Image (tube, rainbow, N blue to C red):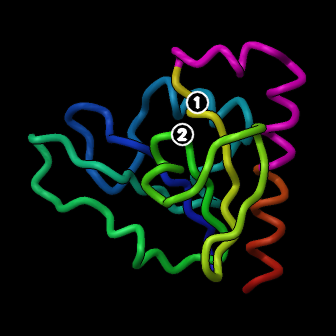
Amino acid sequence: MTPIILGERPSKGGPYRTIEPSSTTRQLDRLRPGWELEFKTMNVWPYAWCDEERVDVDALDAPIIVALGSNVLAELGLFTGRWPAWQTRGDSYVLRMPHPSGVNRWYNDATNCRRASNALKVAVKLSCAAA
């Protein structure tokens, strides 16, 4: 089953259910080239200009969820802590990742980027094993 990358909000003007080109996608491109072919993307909250409803996080059916940032983790009822790290939520494994926006300085450290890149690789491998 395809793992899900769960973000906060779409870029203004972009579809609600996908992560549009932005500083977030550029960071994901650096961490895991080709990530958009390996992960399904969803956003938790719509903006007023979105005509779609918010994601029902209780209905997410995926063995692997990559939660981008503390706001998404809070929506999932999980806690933040060391990045990246794994938690369980029901039948899913959730990879806690800092939000990869241009504002977040965590990704400025090369060691952190390697850790995040390796964690995304593990997420793909785990989803293949779960299929």
* Residue for point 53% across, 34% down: 25
110 drawn magenta: yes
**x, y percentage for residue 26?**
57, 28
Apparent side of residue 130 relative to residue 13 in the rendered image (left or right): right
Label whose residue precedes the other's in the sequence (2 or 1)? 2
The residue wearing badge 2 is: 70
Apparent side of residue 10 relative to residue 27 in the rendered image (left or right): left
Q: Quadrant of the N terminus?
A: bottom right
**x, y percentage for residue 79?**
61, 49
Query: Front-most of 40 and 53?
Result: 53
Q: Main secondary structure of the magenta part?
A: helix
Q: Is residue 110 above or below residue 27?
A: above
Where are the magenta residues, as a range? Answer: 102-119
Q: Quadrant of residue 27?
A: top right
Q: Nearer the viewer, mark 2 or mark 1?
A: 2
* Residue for point 18% across, 62% down: 53
| Residue kind at label 1, given as amino acid type | Pro
Q: CA distance from mark 2 to mark 1?
A: 11 Å
The residue wearing badge 1 is: 100
Q: Is residue 89 above or below residue 129?
A: above
Q: Quadrant of the C terminus?
A: bottom right
Q: Is residue 92 above or below residue 17?
A: below
Secondary element under disc 2, as helix, strand or loop, is: helix
| Residue kind at label 2, given as amino acid type | Ser
